[in-house]
């Protein structure tokens, strides 16, 4: 073994030891994310009682608020489902096969996967995580290129670990742009914030570009080389992706199930509706509409799979990935209701107390950094961008108003910091791990390295760019006529 190869192998082993120790600790001590959600409800309920709220007001807020986010829960589940369906369609599979032939070295392959994963996540994080996993597998199947499969897998996760919340499927930005999905208590504080005030600000887009560049460079230079490389074969992973045999039509009544006629007609109908929306409404209001976004992706998945039968088979495979959202979001709704509705001593809610706390410690220009650090820490225990925003937003946005921090940028402070815990907590790795056939401990070493670099950069960006904004009072929409 040459000196250079020995040095790279030794360095990789040192990083791997640290990474594996962290992964073993998280796998041993971190329970399922649902346990954190259950515990969060109990802790907030107890905190409300300590704050002076009556037991009756706490249980009423819990029960009455449990289904407040039904529409948003379905919407977030559909983000995952539509992304999965589009990523597994035949045209995307052919695209992935062609892209897999582009990289010409191991390090370039890893950084290439990271770059594409992040680029796709700007459109849809659910699409990104499946697309990245399939691309990693396609590159790993190449016989002319020896690449570390763990590094490829970690790179495939970078869309969700770096910039997803700065893109179009950002849960917080989508929620703030959709009045019907906002809890009334939050709507009264923030009003509606379309994408022009959040993800489409130049500060947000610059942050996104910086993080994409940073992540790509780290992925490139941290890719194992020489004897340190562990391929999929070394890890015991079978890369043979044999397509399922096409189902055969058995009855005349099944004809339309195996025909492309209805998907094409529905695609044309959706395209016509989209043209009408852009012709009659402001561009940002259409782009910011979560319902429009999901409609387009759902029908796109149907068209790309060509027949209703193929589409439904893809949906069946995608549904399990939505389970965590379906059972956790009602608990987040209850947390938000207890925070904002269970009044304590003097008629002050727990949310108002927290708002005062963050206002006090966040004065003097430190607000952006304080909120970013708090969001990151909370995200380790509540790994859900949309659900956590509903818990955090009432007091964070009230604090932002109190210290004259721009509300749109406050959403983006949350968004850029919210992605950081994904690099540590493997909850959202689960769909990717199923595609890669790996364990979280195989990837955490590489994602933790990204976290070490991302944290100071994120804190610096939210502080410096926050100073370029001015405060804009919220515009509260008029209630709809009965």
Image (cartoon, grey):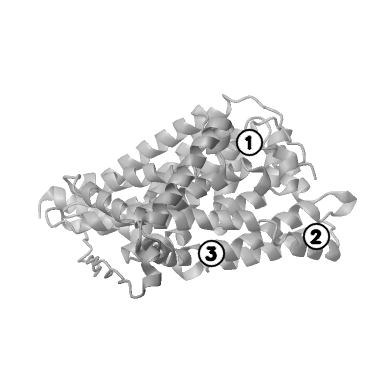
Residue 232 appears at what percent x and percent y?
23, 63
Query: Which corner quadrant holds the C terminus?
Result: top right
Image-based side of 374 in relation to 183, left or right? left
On the question of residue 198 being in view, the answer is: no
The first of marks 1 and 3 along the sequence is 1
Q: Separation of disc 2 and disc 1 at Cα?
A: 34 Å
Within-10-Å neighbours for mark 2: few <14, some 14–19, many 20+: few
Q: Helix or strand or loop: what does disc 2 sit on? A: helix
Q: Which of the 4 image quarters holds residue 339?
A: bottom right
**Residue that carries the numbered disc 1 in the rendered image:** 193
Q: CA distance from mark 2 to mark 3?
A: 30 Å
Q: Residue furthest front?
A: 252
Q: Nearer the viewer, residue 78 or 34?
A: 78
Which residue is at 29% across, 48% downward? 113
> Of the numbered discs in the image, which one, if any, rests on residue 377?
none
Q: Is residue 211 left or right of residue 476?
A: left
Image quarter of residue 177: top right
Q: What residue is rendered at 56% in x and 24% in y?
A: 468
* Residue 372 image offset from top left, x and y in percent: 57, 42
Q: Which residue is mark 2?
A: 50
Residue 55 location (% of width, % of height): 84, 65
Vertical side of 337 occupied by 464: above or below: above
**Tag nearer the camera, 2 or 3:** 3
- Mark in front: 2 vs 1: 1
Residue that mark 3 sits on: 324
Q: Earlier in the sequence, mark 2 or mark 3?
A: 2
User: Distance of mark 1 from mark 3, alpha carbons?
Assistant: 27 Å
């Amino acid at each position: 073994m040459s000196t250079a190869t020995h040095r790279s192998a030794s360095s990789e082993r040192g990083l791997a030891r640290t990474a594996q120790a962290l992964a073993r600790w998280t796998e041993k001590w971190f329970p399922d994310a649902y346990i954190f959600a259950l515990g969060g409800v109990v802790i907030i309920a107890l905190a409300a009682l300590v704050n002076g709220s009556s037991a009756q007001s706490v249980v009423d807020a819990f029960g009455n608020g449990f289904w407040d986010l039904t529409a948003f829960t379905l919407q977030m589940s559909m983000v995952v489902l539509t992304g999965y369906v589009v990523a597994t369609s035949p045209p995307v599979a052919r695209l992935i096969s062609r892209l897999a032939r582009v990289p010409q070295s191991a390090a370039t392959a890893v950084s290439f996967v990271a770059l594409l994963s992040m680029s796709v996540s700007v459109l849809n994080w659910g699409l990104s995580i499946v697309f990245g996993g399939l691309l990693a597998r396609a590159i790993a199947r190449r016989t002319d290129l020896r690449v570390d499969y763990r590094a490829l897998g970690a790179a495939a996760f970078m869309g969700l670990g770096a910039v997803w919340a700065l893109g179009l499927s950002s849960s917080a930005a989508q929620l703030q742009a959709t009045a019907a999905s906002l809890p009334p208590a939050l709507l009264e504080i923030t009003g509606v914030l379309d994408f022009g005030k959040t993800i489409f600000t130049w500060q947000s887009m610059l942050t996104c570009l910086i993080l994409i560049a940073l992540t790509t460079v780290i992925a490139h230079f941290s890719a194992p080389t020489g004897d340190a490389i562990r391929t999929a074969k070394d890890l015991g992973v079978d890369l043979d992706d044999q397509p399922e045999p096409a189902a055969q039509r058995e009855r005349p009544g099944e004809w339309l199930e195996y025909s492309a006629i209805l998907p094409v007609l529905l695609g044309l109908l959706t395209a016509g509706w989209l043209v009408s929306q852009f012709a009659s409404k402001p561009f940002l209001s259409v782009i910011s509409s979560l319902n429009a976004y999901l409609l387009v992706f759902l029908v796109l998945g149907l068209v790309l799979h060509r027949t209703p039968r193929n589409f439904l088979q893809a949906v069946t495979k995608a549904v399990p990935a939505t389970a965590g959202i379906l059972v956790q979001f009602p608990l987040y709704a209850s947390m938000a209701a207890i925070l904002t509705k269970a009044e304590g001593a003097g008629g002050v809610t727990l949310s108002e107390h927290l708002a005062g706390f963050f206002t006090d410690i966040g004065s003097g220009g430190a607000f952006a950094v304080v909120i970013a650090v708090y969001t990151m820490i909370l995200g380790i225990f509540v790994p859900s961008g949309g659900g956590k925003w509903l818990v955090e937003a009432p007091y964070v946005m009230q604090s932002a108003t109190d210290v004259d921090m721009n509300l749109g940028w406050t959403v983006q402070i949350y968004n850029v910091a919210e992605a950081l815990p994904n690099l540590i907590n493997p909850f959202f790795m689960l769909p990717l791990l199923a595609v890669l056939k790996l364990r979280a401990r195989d990837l955490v070493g590489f994602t933790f390295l990204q976290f070490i670099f991302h944290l100071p950069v994120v804190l610096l960006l939210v502080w410096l760019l926050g100073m370029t904004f001015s405060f804009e009072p919220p515009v509260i929409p008029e209630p709809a006529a009965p």
